[in-house]
Image (cartoon, grey):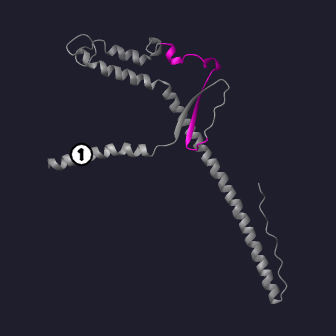
Amino acid sequence: MTKTGTLAALLLIGTAFAAPAAAQENAGDKVVQKIVYGDDACEASTDPNEIVVCMRMDEQERYRIPEKLRSDPNAIANTSWTERVRSMETVGNFGTDSCSPVGAGGFTGCTQTLVQAARAEKKQGEEAIAGRLIEEERQRRLSNIDRDAAAVEARQKEIEAQLDSRKAEREAAAAAMRAQADGLEPERRPEPETPSPE
């Protein structure tokens, strides 16, 4: 019984690692991020599978140090109230996994604290803004797909109408030739209406 349970667990773990690898092979559009200043044009990509996201900044920012490097990101003014309250929760925290000089093993939580601080800083950085811009560009492209499909469908209907009118003309000409061959007067049919090119 334990052998089958162990085997099932190994198979489950194997499929968990295979899914991300398959997702990486089928990656979506290539995304290129650019920063443009003032009235500079955002150059479009020539590759249809490439999304260009331009973050526009003021002209006066062109030669300045990036804003996130100008000030202290850990300043109190840059933190939210929830983060301030969370820091109050750890006031009496000491001992193992606390990253404090107090108690045995207090140093053991320092790496974990650094990793958590880095993750929090990354969530609030420019990547979050760029992610939103990328999603907006994808939505814009999807809306263009519907418009382009409607134009192709209208053109297809126009071609089909032209083919139908040509077929009717050929049938009328064939009927006239048969009637002439039989010695009968060909029956006059009304001319088919051709659709307007609007």
For badge 1, the amino acid type reads Leu
Above-or-below relation of 192 to 135: below
Q: Position of residue 164 (x, y in %)?
A: 72, 68
Residue 110 forms part of the magenta stretch: no
**Residue sitting nearer the eye, 53 or 182:** 53
Segment tinted magenta in the rendering: 46-71
How many numbered dots are placed on residues in this image?
1
In the shown orientation, is residue 114 left or right of residue 79? Answer: left
- Is 51 within the magenta? yes
Foreground: 91 or 132? 132
Image coordinates of residue 90 in percent, x first then y, are: 31, 15
Q: Within 10 angstroms of label 1, few (less than 14), some, or many (20 or more) residues?
A: few
Residue 71 lies, in percent from the top left, at: 49, 13
Q: Which residue is mark 1?
A: 10
Q: Please tell me whether mark 1 sits on a helix, a strand or a loop.
A: helix
Q: Nearer the viewer, residue 125 or 40?
A: 40
**Residue at image point 50% right, 16% down:** 69
For the view shown, which residue lies furthest in the bottom direction? 183
Residue extending furthest toward the top? 102
192 to 6, vertically: above or below: below
Residue at image point 83% right, 87% down: 184
The quadrant the C terminus occupies is bottom right
In the picture shown, does residue 12 fall above or below 110?
A: below
Residue 107 or residue 98, whichever sits in front: 107
The image quarter in which residue 51 lies: top right
Q: What's the residue at 31%, 20% (across, down)? A: 111
Residue at far right of view: 185
Horizontal placement of 42 versus 3: left or right? right
Residue displayed at 49% across by 43% down? 28
- Does 187 sit left or right of 53 as displayed? right
Percent from the top left, x then y, of residue 86? 36, 17
